[in-house]
């Protein structure tokens, strides 16, 4: 799955799994995916620009530090930077829910490696 379609798929999947779910969570997960996608498209080797690469990044303890450093050099009007700032300004318990939602979706959609 190409990185460009991952963000759209996350949103579509969330909507199909939980119709009527509070749209806050969809928007929050979209912001995180937009940020991570932007980072991966610019910082990771081409072979890691996929859903497995997203999962690997979000599984690292230092992923937020990497994105913090990356987004300091990104133009302030960049949509992905604004999305990341929105995520960063959220309290930790909400962040945990956002990350859990994105990782749950990714784990359901990871290619079978067996």
Image: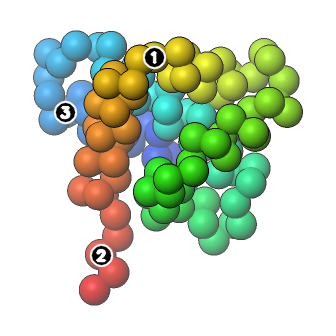
- Find the distance from the CA under tag 2 to the CA under tag 3: 22 Å
Tell me if residue 72 comes above or below residue 50 in the rendering: above
Which residue is located at x 64 percent, y 42 percent? Answer: 65
The reply to whether discs 3 and 1 touch (Cβ–Cβ < 8 Å) is no
Is the residue marked by circle 1 packed among few (<14), some (14-19), or many (20+) residues within 10 Å?
A: few
Of pointers 3 and 1, the one earlier in the residue sequence = 3
Residue 110 falls in which quadrant of the image?
bottom left
Indicate which label's residue lies in the foreground, 2 or 3: 2
Residue count near mark 2 (Cα–Cα under 10 Å), binned few <14, some 14–19, many ≥20: few
Return the residue at label 1. 90
Q: Quadrant location of the C terminus? A: bottom left
Residue at position x 57%, y 48% from top?
Answer: 63
- In the picture, the disc for residue 112 is 2
Of the numbered discs in the image, which one, if any, rests on residue 16?
3
**Residue at the image position 34 percent from the left and 22 percent from the top:** 94
Whole-percent x, y for residue 71 in the image: 74, 33
Quadrant in the rendering for residue 8: top left
For the residues marked 3 and 1, what is the alpha-carbon distance in whole angstroms?
25 Å
Residue that protrudes farthest toward the bottom in the picture: 114
Question: Residue at the location (18% across, 18% down)?
Answer: 21
Percent x, y of residue 83: 58, 22
């Amino acid at each position: 799955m190409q990185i460009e379609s991952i963000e759209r798929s996350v949103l579509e999947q969330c909507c199909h799994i939980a119709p009527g779910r509070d749209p806050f969570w969809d928007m929050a997960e979209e912001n995180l995916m937009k940020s991570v996608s932007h980072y991966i498209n610019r910082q990771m080797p081409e072979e890691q620009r996929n859903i497995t690469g997203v999962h690997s990044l979000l599984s690292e303890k230092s992923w937020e530090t990497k994105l913090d450093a990356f987004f300091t050099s990104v133009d302030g009007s960049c949509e992905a930077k604004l999305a990341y700032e929105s995520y960063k300004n959220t309290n930790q318990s909400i962040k945990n829910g956002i990350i859990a939602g994105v990782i749950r979706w990714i784990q359901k959609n990871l290619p079978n490696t067996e």
